[in-house]
Image (cartoon, helix red, strand yellow):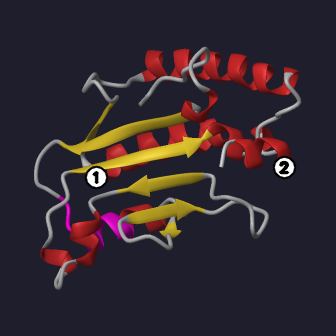
């Protein structure tokens, strides 16, 4: 979901987009290698890589999710992955961590390195104009959260939106 539901249910305050292979599918090892080059580490759940927060114990800034069956295969490097989801939960991450910029930069960097197309949940390409629009919507959402004493990354926001 590459749009921020500013007026929707607050639990939906997640930014996500998909990276879809333009050509050959990726092996799990290749995917992990590319993600590591952008600061991601293995998550606790199979098929999930995370960009850790600066503060230990804080929720990860970003998550990169792919088919857990591929990650759990006997020979994961023979598993073909054609599509991954890159996301961050807005209420969980303080604005000061610059999660939007990390998300946008990781999306662009990974798409370039892995020859992937960036698309939203409707399969529409996500380009510079879409990122600008999402950034503006996100600022509105941050302001709305702060207005309700639920600033992104605050203990209250993390409890409510967990």
Is residue 106 left or right of 147 when viewed as pictured? left
- Residue 1 or residue 157, whichever sits in front: 157
* Residue range of the region highlighted in magenta in the rendering: 26-33
- On the image, the x and y values in percent for residue 151 come to 82, 34
Read off the residue under disc 1.
Answer: 114
Residue that sits furthest to the bottom in the current view: 74
Residue 33 in the image: state x and y as whole percent: 37, 70
Question: On residue 80, which mark appears?
Answer: none
Using a 10 Å C-alpha cutoff, classify the residue at mark 1 as few (fewer than 14 neighbours), some (14 to 19) or many (20 or more).
many
The answer to whether residue 30 is left or right of residue 148 is left
Left or right: residue 106 versus residue 114 is: right
At horizontal 34% and vertical 28% (from top left) the residue drawn is 120
* Relative image position of residue 69 (x, y in whole percent): 22, 68
Circle on res. 155: 2
Queried whether the magenta region covers residue 67, the answer comes back as no
**Pointer 2 or 1: first along the chain:** 1
Residue closer to the observer: 112 or 122: 122
Q: Residue at x 54, y 36 (%)?
A: 14
Q: Is residue 56 above or below residue 8?
A: below
* Local secondary structure at mark 1: helix
Q: Residue 133's image quarter? A: top right
Residue 17 position within the rendered picture, expressed as x and y whole percent measured from the top left: 39, 36
Secondary structure found at label 2: helix
């Amino acid at each position: 979901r590459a749009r921020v539901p500013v007026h929707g249910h607050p639990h939906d305050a997640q930014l996500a987009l998909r990276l879809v292979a333009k050509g050959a599918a990726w092996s799990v090892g290749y995917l992990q290698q590319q993600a590591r080059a952008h600061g991601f580490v293995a998550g606790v759940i199979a098929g999930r890589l995370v960009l850790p927060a600066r503060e230990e114990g804080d929720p990860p800034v970003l998550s990169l999710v792919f088919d857990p069956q591929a990650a759990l295969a006997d020979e994961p490097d023979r598993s073909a992955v054609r599509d991954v989801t890159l996301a961050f939960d807005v209420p969980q991450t303080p604005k000061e961590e610059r999660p939007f910029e990390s998300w946008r930069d990781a999306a662009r960097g990974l798409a370039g390195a892995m020859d992937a197309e960036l698309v939203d949940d409707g399969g529409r390409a996500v380009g510079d104009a879409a990122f600008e629009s999402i950034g503006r919507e996100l600022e509105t959402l941050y302001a709305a959260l702060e207005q309700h004493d639920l600033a992104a990354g605050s203990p209250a926001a993390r409890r409510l939106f967990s």
